[in-house]
Amino acid sequence: MVSESLKKVDSAVLLWKSLVRQPEFQAGALRLNQDITLRTFKNQNYRYLDSERFEFIVAMKELLKPVASLENEKIEYLIFRIYECYHKELAYSAGIDSRFSIDIVFQFIEFLCADGKKEDIEKVLQKETSLDKKEVESIISHIKAFNKLGAYFSKSSSLKKTIENGEQILSAIASAYPDITWLALESMFYLLVAQYALATKYSCESLLRGWMNEYGFDENQYVVVANFFPPGTSLLDFRGNYTNAIRSLHGMSASTRPEYDLLLLRSIGNYFSSWIVKVAHQMESDLQVA
């Protein structure tokens, strides 16, 4: 689910995702049929989807014991984790937990490129922002997951193939990052699909022209930003060029640094993010209908 998406989330599917991402399932210790299990969740929603912890544990024990090659104690521990994972997904869906946004990636890039950031990044973020340790760790974890997911896209020979293997790819990332909700990972996936799809039709030059026209900038301002994105630069290279541009500007002394250039770069970063999110929303909707 892309950040701010209006897509209706199926609670039964969220519970299934919370179950299948567990290492016991990945290792083959649970023999469950997806369709039958989903029907069970929906038909007995009061025991699974809308239940309190105790009733959930009882119901899950009945479901898993016959199909699990695990000791009772391990089954209970597994159910505890499924319950916590499922409710974390619900909180994310409801907007109670902070949602992943591609804007965070660009804010993080600028923070990393800022002057004097030589200390441990987690400590610096806590020191210079209002974020606590847990929030900082979550941001860094999400960005690492986004980058790892992006590696699957860059290695794939076909965007269509990547989309077809989406479930498998997301499962692998979910196993590597158990603290991140499936919905957040799904958001990242659609954002990357959007970026790679747009890159087949448009270049950074197209992006800059759209930015100039929509935000009302003139040719002089266009040239300032275009210097950082040479003609022919792929949209897939936008983040790398953006990072280099921010780093080069922050590398200047405070007296010579053109602050207006920084403002223009932030503006193009915002435009890129909004463009990707808009297309990701549409693709998410189209793929769900399909």
Image (cartoon, rainbow, N blue to C red):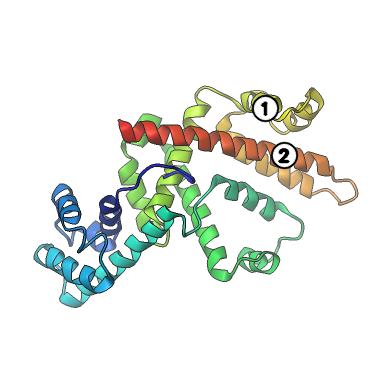
Residue 191 in percent (x, y) is at 48, 40
Mark 1–mark 2 CB contact (< 8 Å): no
- Residue with the mark numbered 1: 214
User: Label 2: few (<14), some or many (≥20) within 10 Å?
Assistant: many
* Residue in the image at 16% along x and 50% along y: 39
Callout in the foreground (1, 2)? 1
Q: Is residue 230 visible?
A: yes
The C terminus appears in which quarter of the rendering? Answer: top left
161 to the left or right of 224: left
| Residue type, numbered disc 2 | Leu
User: Split into 4 quadrants, where in the image is the N terminus?
Assistant: top left
- Does residue 40 appear left or right of residue 148 in this picture? left
Identify the secondary structure beneath mark 1.
helix
Q: Secondary structure at mark 2?
A: helix
Residue depicted at 79% across the width and 39% down the height: 261
Vertically, is 76 above or below 214? below
Rendering coords of residue 14 (x, y %) = 30, 53
Most foreground residue, 96 or 22? 96
The type of residue carrying mark 1 is Glu
Residue at 49% from the left image edge and 55% from the top image edge:
142
Image height of 202 relative to 285, above or below: above
- Residue marked by disc 2: 265
